[in-house]
Image (cartoon, rainbow, N blue to C red):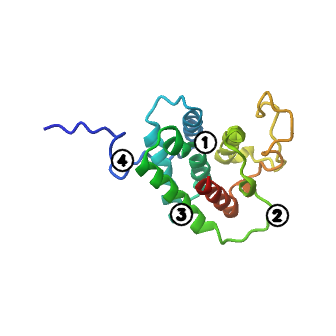
Amino acid sequence: MTNTETAEHRPDGEAPLTPAPTTPAEWDELIDDWDEIRQGYHLGDARRAVLDCARHLEASVTADGPGTALWTLGLVLTGPYVIYAHPDGPAEARVLKAMSTVEQAFGQMSCAHDEHPGDDMPLDDELDNLRYVLEMLAHPERDTGEGALTEDERRPDDDSDTWFERRMTRDVWACPQNLAGFARAFADS
């Protein structure tokens, strides 16, 4: 008898975990996949990519890993896939558990920032520029500290002061309080 169960239909704990990116270029590829999932045109196994992100996030929080901010914001982009686009109860539970892990680990930490982007998380359509935050986090050389998107990074139809303006620093985006804010807002949405 042959087991024809694909990775798409296995419980998430049975599928082998995809290795985490180790270079900025590998992160760029993963960020592209996450953005494709969010936009609805990813050709790969989107459910597995979302679950891998959730599993990597839980492991990173537990190990106090350097990729925790990337995994958290990646799940903000991709998590709605298994919650709204292609509802999947067990996958949704895993995503919410991972976000709860972030909130529990970082929610009570203090920091010196007056505000965080996660404090006033925008509506879904305003998250289009979140990929640029992920790219900045994956590329330390892109953290200029000036906090503004370049003309190329802004959406063509966006000439206003966006939610992302003045907040493009690694220190603010990777702040545990910011990550906890995103996790809370995600779980409440």
**Residue 183's image quarter?**
bottom right
Q: Is residue 101 left or right of residue 133?
A: left
Q: CA distance from mark 2 to mark 3?
A: 24 Å
Q: Secondary structure at mark 3?
A: helix
Of the numbered discs 3 and 4, the one sitting upstream in the chain is 4
For residue 24, which numbered disc appears in the image? Answer: 1
Q: Which residue is mark 3?
A: 101
Q: CA distance from mark 4 to mark 1?
A: 23 Å
Q: From the viewer's side, name the closer residue of 84 and 143.
A: 84
Establish if 74 lies above or below 159. Answer: below
User: Which tag is nearer the camera, tag 2 or tag 4?
Assistant: 2
User: Which tag is nearer the camera, tag 3 or tag 4?
Assistant: 3
Of the numbered discs 2 and 4, the one sitting upstream in the chain is 4
| Three-letter amino acid code of the residue under disc 4 | Pro
For residue 16, which numbered disc appears in the image? Answer: 4
For residue 114, which numbered disc appears in the image? Answer: 2
Label 4: how many Cα within 10 Å (few below 14, some 14–19, many 20+): few
User: Which tag is nearer the camera, tag 1 or tag 3?
Assistant: 3
Label 2: how many Cα within 10 Å (few below 14, some 14–19, many 20+): few
Of the numbered discs 2 and 1, the one sitting upstream in the chain is 1
Q: CA distance from mark 2 to mark 1?
A: 30 Å
Q: Secondary structure at mark 2?
A: loop
Q: Secondary structure at mark 4?
A: loop
Q: From the viewer's side, name the closer residue of 91 and 64.
A: 91
Of the numbered discs 1 and 3, the one sitting upstream in the chain is 1
| Three-letter amino acid code of the residue under disc 1 | Pro
